[in-house]
Image: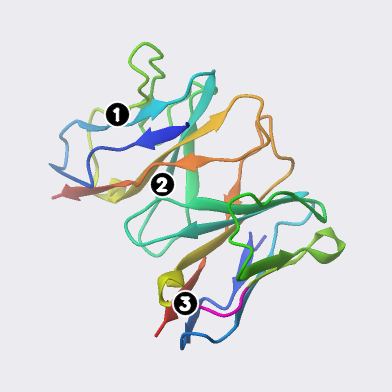
Amino acid sequence: EAGVVQSPRYKIIEKKQPVAFWCNPISGHNTLYWYLQNLGQGPELLIRYENEEAVDDSQLPKDRFSAERLKGVDSTLKIQPAELGDSAVYLCASSLDPGGYNEQFFGPGTRLTVL
Amino acid sequence: AQRVTQPEKLLSVFKGAPVELKCNYSYSGSPELFWYVQYSRQRLQLLLRHISRESIKGFTADLNKGETSFHLKKPFAQEEDSAMYYCALRARGSQGNLIFGKGTKLSVKP
């Protein structure tokens, strides 16, 4: 089992450019999370999906960030246009279901550098 | 507001010494508390949760509701324990959203 897969692992772009991150959760996991981790900070939730529905996107900056989870499996997080302050690690996680005792499994993250 | 505080950015101990990583939380309801660990070049993973009341890799953590704390302890630190440790909170009955502290880097010296 590969676990949660994310790509790319690293991305360097210039400000104002668009960027997209991809996540493939563990097979059978209905819930998918995108977290943002700034340097020296803990992960912060951006958006949570239950199957294909975004059930909590209250922390997603919707002016420039968007996400989708077509068919309730893979997910893509997009930033357009990127700003210098978006430089961070973007983590994807998945769990069987959102609550109860279900553990969240994290991917390796995508480290974004905006120049 | 829900908040998790880890007061130490870095904790350095010698091998064999006891270690305690502090975690305090702010939440008016009944929380679920977790410790996550990230070893060098590895992904973030669950270490233990207070509900399970288990010991993982020699680590234990007790939820103290009076002091709103969930400190992580190990009586004898090992070099392989060196990692980033994150305390996290989930509101009981919520739909999975974790709130993380800023993390503590544990360095165990030989």
What is the distance, in whole Å, between disc 1 and disc 2 at their CAs?
13 Å
Residue at the image point whose x is 39% and y is 35% from the top: B4
**Are the residues flagged by discs 1 and 2 in contact, CB closer than 8 Å?**
no
Q: Residue pushed farthest top?
A: B66
Q: Nearer the viewer, mark 1 or mark 3?
A: 3
The magenta segment? A79-83
Q: Is residue B37 magenta?
A: no
**Majority secondary structure of the magenta segment?**
loop
- Residue A29: tell me if it is visible: no
Secondary element under disc 2, as helix, strand or loop, is: strand
- Which residue occupies the foreground of this view, B22 or A15? A15
Report the amino acid beneath label 2: Val
- Residue B79 relative to residue A42: left or right: left
Q: Measuring 77% from the left and 56% from the top, which residue is drawn there?
A: A27
The type of residue carrying mark 1 is: Lys
Q: Is A85 placed above or below A3 here?
A: below
Is A35 displayed left or right of A102 in the figure? left
Which residue is label 3 attached to?
Answer: A83
Residue at which label 2 appears: B37
Up-down relation of residue B88 to residue A79 (above or below): above
Answer with mark 1 or mark 2, whichever residue precedes in sequence: 2
Q: Residue at x 53, y 18 (%)?
A: B29
Query: Which residue was labeled with disc 1?
Result: B73
In the picture, the quarter occupied by the N terminus of chain A is bottom right
